[in-house]
Amino acid sequence: MLQELISENVKRAILESYQVELPSVEFQATRKEFEGDITVVVFPMLRSIKGNPAVIGQTIGEFLEKNLTEVVGFNVVKGFLNIVLSDSYMLEQFYRTPDYSRYGLDNITDQTVMVEFSSPNTNKPLHLGHIRNILLGDSVSRILAAAGRKVYKTQIINDRGIHICKSMLAWKRHGNGITPESAGVKGDKLVGDFYVQFDKDYKAEVSQLMNEGKTEEEAKAQAPSLLEAQQMLRQWEAGEPEVVQLWKTMNGWVYEGFEQTYQNLGVSFDSYYYESNTYLLGKDNIEEGLAKGVFFKKEDGSVWCDLTEDGLDEKLVLRSDGTAVYMTQDIGTAIQRVKDNPDITGMIYTVGNEQDYHFKVLFLILKKLGYTWAENLYHLSYGMVDLPSGKMKSREGTVVDADDLMAQMDQTAGDISSELGKLEGYSEEEKQQLYHIIGLGALKYYILKVDPKKRILFNPEESVDFQGNTGPFIQYTYARIQSILRKANEDESIGSGRVDVDLEDREKDVLKQLMLFPEVLQAAADAYSPALIANYTYDLVKFYNSFFQNVPIFGAESPEKIQFRVQLSEATGEVIRLGFDLLGISVPERM
């Protein structure tokens, strides 16, 4: 690695000139206004060396230029040493990778990670909030696999509880035997409509009870719909056949609907866990923890974990009546997953940031229980997605449905593509396919380019812009490169293999960005951040477009330069495709 080579020689320069052993060397990208390809930051060295940073930089620069053939020049700006690399070194690095289609991808290591994402409730369709969760989990899974981890993708489906019974009760009251087939509606949408219907019934009952003199609190607790839903939940827990059958039927409708949405989004899972199976897990583990002294029992019989010495509080893990809480089943489910997949060395939970504290506690308890894999648990916490119109509420039916949003994105992509008028010769089927690739790419990129921890204000129209930091802009550049390669393939005079040429500044910019990809991929895997891949790819596209607009390809002054520029274009296209594949985004051959 170049940085290691330069770092080693910077340390040699300091040892020879100042008789000091530097602990480390800090690098950064060279600022555009200065000549150079990589920059050594001198200021941190002042902790070890007394002196003027500009003089120290000059000393190091002279040493590197004398001792490294890779370095052909330098300049010092205050405490920054900007190093100029030789064209031969840049070309050597470029040609070191004969095939860029798998550039930067790592071999499988001994790390096996389970990534949990999506994890919806079965009482409503997937919505915009779920989309951020799903896209993050899917992309992080892809990035980890590309960085050499073995990955299992899973989800836990919240298929039991009072919210499920609310949809079931509303269907019994208002459904008249309706099914997704008879209604011509996706199953998850149909069930979600009945969830909204329950809320209407419930609010009307609360209003009536308050008119009859009840307080709001009393009315909410005594509304017949709620009491009936609670009774239905008790019947489900008791295994009452008719209730269980309706539960299976309606959940089945929802699963079919979810699967269509997942296919449309281009995501898949290796396994599914269902809360109806896992909600009893964990009790045995609590007993084991009691025996080990990890937990303690209070006078009322409830079981707790004291985390006060760890800066947290006391956490309930079993109620006094012996029933589980969410923490109980999360402990049990984590342990069960490792039993099901004994090679797991860590787990990633993709869950919104409102659950930050819950996962701190969960991970700490699992460590205290002595599980080695508990050292490698990570909460992929993310911010909410808002719309220009405000927050979404599923009870009131004001959510942005995932399927509707994707259809809107396809429509917007179609409208803009038609305005640009570049689809001559496309069949209607090809156009629709392209609109979906552009629309879905716009949606995914807009969400994934933002650091997961930040909140997003999602603007569909802005995301499909063909200019700026958007998916379609990057897809368009990829398609442009494919057009160049098609033209090059038709020209038999363009050779293959290595050529030695003098490099233009814009060519070097593209080469330097290409060289960063393996490093960025590993950094994205370590940080669980698709945003690093998204923004790297955008920067690569910016450098390539600057090269394309200012440096002739087929009009170059020599056959060698034409050949190199075609090869540079091809490598750039492959890395764009790799980067977008890590985001779960397709790239079109033509646009």
Image: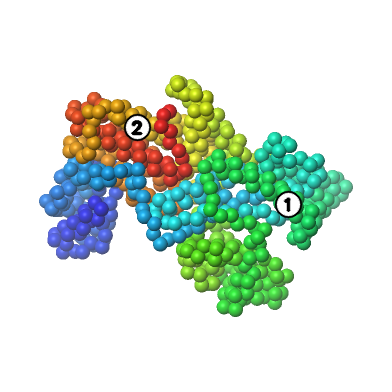
Foreground residue, 444 or 73?
A: 444
Looking at the image, residue 96 sits to the left or right of residue 140; the answer is left
**Label 1 to label 2: alpha-carbon separation:** 52 Å
Residue pictured at 11% horizontal, 51% vertical:
66
| Residue 365 vertical placement versus 384 (above, below) | below
Under tag 2, what secondary structure?
Answer: helix
Residue pictured at 59% horizontal, 54% vertical:
272
Q: Are marks 1 and 2 in contact (CB under 8 Å)?
A: no
Foreground residue, 577 or 449?
A: 577
- Mark 1 nearby-residue class (10 Å; few <14, some 14–19, many ≥20): some
- Mark 2 nearby-residue class (10 Å; few <14, some 14–19, many ≥20): many
In percent of width and height, residue 131 lies at 56, 44
Q: Quadrant of residue 314?
A: bottom right
In percent of width and height, residue 94 lies at 25, 43
**Rendered-image quadrant of the C terminus:** top left
Under tag 1, what secondary structure?
Answer: helix
Q: Label 1 amino acid?
A: Trp
Q: Look at the image and tell me whether residue 526 can be seen.
A: no
Kindly give the residue lying farthest to the right in the view shown. 212
Looking at the image, residue 76 sits to the left or right of residue 377; the answer is left
Residue pictured at 53% horizontal, 64% vertical:
338
Q: Quadrant of residue 569?
A: top left
Residue pictured at 16% horizontal, 64% vertical:
19
Q: Label 2 amino acid?
A: Ile
Q: Look at the image and tell me whether residue 489 can be seen.
A: yes
In percent of width and height, residue 38 lies at 25, 47
Residue bearing the label numbered 2: 481
Residue bearing the label numbered 1: 247
Count of numbered circles on the image: 2
Foreground residue, 177 or 308?
A: 177
In percent of width and height, residue 402 lies at 59, 40
Looking at the image, residue 359 sits to the left or right of residue 17; the answer is right
